[in-house]
Amino acid sequence: MMNWKRRILSMSLAFCLILIFAPSHAFAVASFARQTGLACSGCHTTIPELTPLGRTFKLYGYTMTGMQAITSKNGKTTAGLNLGNYLPLSAFFQVSNTSTSKPQPGTQNGSFELPQAASLFLAGAMSTHAGGFIQITYNTQDNHFGWDNTDIRYANSRKLGGKDLVFGLTLNNNPTVEDLWNDVPAWGFPFVSPDSTPTPMASAVIDGGLAQDVAGLGTYAMWNNHLYGAVTGYRSEHLGGPQPIDGAGFGINIRGVAPYWRLAWQQTMGNNYLEFGTYGIHVSSSPNTILGLTDRVTDVAADMQYERILPTQHNNLVTVHSTYIHETSTLDATLAAGGAAFPQHHLNTFRLDGIYHFGNKYAATIGTFATWGTPDAMLFAQAPVSGSANGDPKSNGYIANFSYWPVQNIQLAAQYTGYAKFNGLGSNYDGAGRNASDNNSLYLMIWFIF
């Protein structure tokens, strides 16, 4: 216990020293900031949390620009050109230190990563109506770069019923990455996370289960700046696997096309903003093969985002995000392979967070999360640290985060995650003597964006 307290004290002191000696002026250097000539705070509150301008910028395909471009007129037999004067590259670099309440067996407690992750971005306008967000990321655990979130868009606008209609196409590799709001899995809280701590074993397919492992083509539209809808079809792409795909070694191999849908309404009322909507996906897949029996999974979700500008000197802001995902599954293929005790299952996920923004320099966040569903001792098998002693997927807890931006492109964050239940139980959840609270973690991070 004393060692744990000393670790918290030493890391906290180090974090405070960084805060004290950090610079205090502001500037913007990321690709979108260079392209638009706007500070980072024009489009973001807490990165990656978007402002109304940021949502509009994304809706229009990342094409808004404040810089001169190389142009050529378009004609019947002449191809036009609208090309930026620079290659829109940017990068980020994360350094972190993470400790859990109790070490994982056979490991030291305290993971210092330099870096935890580093990303390169090709992000910005490609032409008058096309733009993109393409990311490759270095991961310390794998010790190599890999393809990360990608969203390439075409966008245009017309009048429909006398109201503005913005519509477009998206090519992307992660369901919900194309979304405009920060209550969906790709962009939801927590915005930063450790990569060395145990995490609950059960999660919905749409909750990151297909991220960077699929390729999708979809369409979207926003009418009258209120009603938003999107439809995308996804196929497995399995980067790093053989092409054409044989499915070996991959738990999800989409059979046919997996349809994703999204519907949302947004409304501004004075200093208040509200978005509510629904999204979901249906996946038919064969684990480790492209033949034979299939697992069929349907996720249906509801989401909400609320923002209120407070009448303070620095326009402090309160934001609230929430999502609920209900998953139903028929696991015929997994059952036949001996991975489940019966075919029919359901899984529920709920998340809620609230953020108080002190201007654009400080932010304090508290969030809660819960997962629960059908117990299955074969699907959620017993294993030290990562498994479940009773086959129950129930996990719940909270996350508290405090972030500080000495400048708009450098973030310092302290984040604590606490568990009440982990993989079904609070005490001895893995059958090997580990408690849910043993996985509580303190995470300190510095994020450089340039």
Image (tube, rainbow, N blue to C red):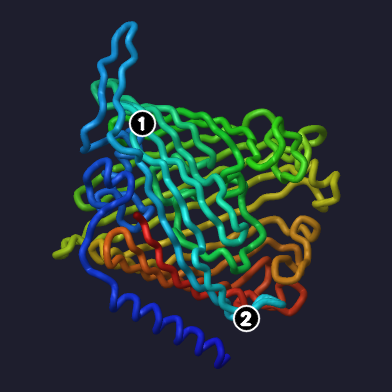
Give the percent coordinates (x, y) of residue 40. Answer: 28, 52
Image quarter of the C terminus: bottom left
Residue that badge 2 annotates: 102
Residue that badge 1 annotates: 126
In-image side of 54 versus 231 (left or right): left
Which label belongs to residue 353?
none
Residue at left 70%, top 56%?
374
Residue at left 53%, top 41%?
175
CA neighbours of label 1 inside 10 A, class few (<14), some (14 to 19), many (20+):
many
Q: Identify whether 30 is placed above or below 264.
A: below
Residue at left 77%, top 41%?
248
Front residue of 322 and 41: 41
Image quarter of the N terminus: bottom right
Q: Amino acid at mark 2?
A: Lys
Q: From this viewpoint, is residue 52 visible? A: no
CA neighbours of label 2 inside 10 A, class few (<14), some (14 to 19), many (20+):
some
Q: Identify whether 347 is placed above or below 216.
A: below
Marks 1, 2: nearer the viewer: 1
